[in-house]
Amino acid sequence: MLFSFYILDRPDTSEQRLALRPAQYEHLGKVEDRILTGGPLLADDGETMIGSLLVIDFPDQMAAENWLANAPFTTGGVFGEATVRPYKSNWPRV
């Protein structure tokens, strides 16, 4: 089942985000074949990263939440408020 991850960074964590990015990408690599889409959420300036939006296939909600709980951006204090919800992709049409 697909799950959407809408995650806002904690304030003033841009340096932590950059430092933890290699570890976060390694964590993402473990589910790379199950990622539908993903990337940073941007501030109004179109450049400043303020969070992340991901859509990833997991067996269930608990697996999705456990994956997020163990993400370096979570354990390293970058991720703040997060919403994980089941997601249905209608586009592109298959």
Image: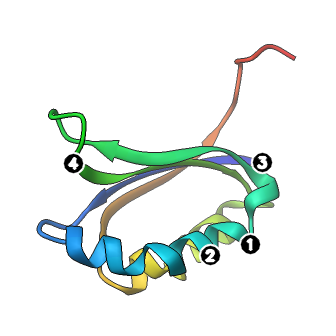
**Tally of numbered discs:** 4
Q: Are marks 2 and 1 in contact (CB under 8 Å)?
A: yes
- Return the disc, 4 or 1, that comes first in the chain's sequence: 1
Q: Which mark is residue 30?
A: 1
Query: Dividing the picture into quarters, in which one does residue 89 lie?
Result: top right
The residue tagged 4 is: 48
Q: CA distance from mark 3 to mark 2?
A: 19 Å
Whole-number angstrom distance, CA of label 2 to CA of label 1 = 6 Å
Residue at the image position 74 percent from the left and 65 percent from the top: 31
Q: Which mark is residue 27?
A: 2
Q: Where is the C terminus found, in terms of image quarters? A: top right
Q: Could you classify mark 3 by the number of other residues whose Cα lies within 10 Å: few (under 14), some (14-19), or many (20 or more)?
A: few
Precedes in sequence: disc 2 or disc 4: 2
Label 3 element class = loop
For label 3, the residue is: 1
Q: Name the residue type under label 4.
A: Thr
Q: Is residue 21 left or right of residue 49?
A: right
Circle 4 Cα neighbour tier, 10 Å, few/some/many (<14 / 14–19 / ≥20):
few
Residue count near mark 1 (Cα–Cα under 10 Å), binned few <14, some 14–19, many ≥20: few
Taking the spot 57% from the left edge, 69% from the top edge, the residue there is: 25
27 or 94, nearer to the observer: 27
